[in-house]
Image: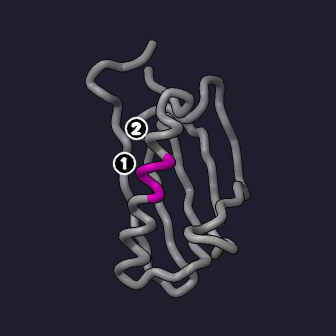
Amino acid sequence: MQYLSDLSEELGQAIAAKITAAINEGMQPPIYSVSIGSNGSIIGCHYLPSDGPGLDCRIVVEHIEAGGLRCPIRTFFCDGYGKTGSFVINVRQHPVN
């Protein structure tokens, strides 16, 4: 099985890319996201404008089962104005044991 500890960089990059694309299409901070692993692990984040480029992320909800978020990981996000998005990270072809 593959867990978030194996994918944390990949998940962070995927969230950043999707939120950047959504902002380019009109989504506005604050932005909220929730990532849910197939084993019930959950991480919820609140993204706010930072003092520099990009957004600051604050984890506001976290429930982690043994081993972390298990793939597939579904991530949903929305802004305060009704715009939404989602994506899934599936298991790679060669899972990490």
Q: Vertically, is 97 above or below 26?
A: above
Q: Is residue 4 left or right of residue 56?
A: left
> What segment carries the magenta color?
12-16
Please name whichever residue, 51 or 95, is drawn nearer the observer in this view of the structure: 51
> Which amino acid is tagged 1?
Val
Please name whichever residue, 37 or 52, is drawn nearer the observer in this view of the structure: 52
- Quadrant where the N terminus sits is top left
Q: Vertically, is 76 above or below 81?
A: above
Disc 2 and disc 1 in contact, CB within 8 angstroms = yes
Q: Vertically, is 45 above or below 80?
A: above
Q: Residue furthest front?
A: 52
Q: Most prominent secondary structure in the magenta stretch? A: helix
Q: Position of residue 59 (x, y in %)?
A: 70, 55
Q: Position of residue 49 (x, y in %)?
A: 64, 75
> Which amino acid is tagged 2?
Pro
Where does label 1 land, which residue?
A: 88
Q: Position of residue 22 (x, y in %)?
A: 39, 73
In magenta stretch: residue 53: no
Label 2 to label 1: alpha-carbon separation: 7 Å
- Residue at the image position 42 percent from the left and 17 percent from the top: 96
Q: Is residue 51 left or right of residue 21?
A: right
Q: Residue furthest left?
A: 93
Crowd band around label 2 with a 10 angstrom C-alpha radius: few (<14), some (14–19), many (20+): some
Residue 72 numbered tag: 2
Crowd band around label 1 with a 10 angstrom C-alpha radius: few (<14), some (14–19), many (20+): some
- Residue at the image position 53 percent from the left and 33 percent from the top: 4
Looking at the image, is mark 2 or mark 1 earlier in the sequence? 2
Please name whichever residue, 72 or 23, is drawn nearer the observer in this view of the structure: 23
- Quadrant where the C terminus sits is top left
- Residue at the image position 55 percent from the left and 35 percent from the top: 69
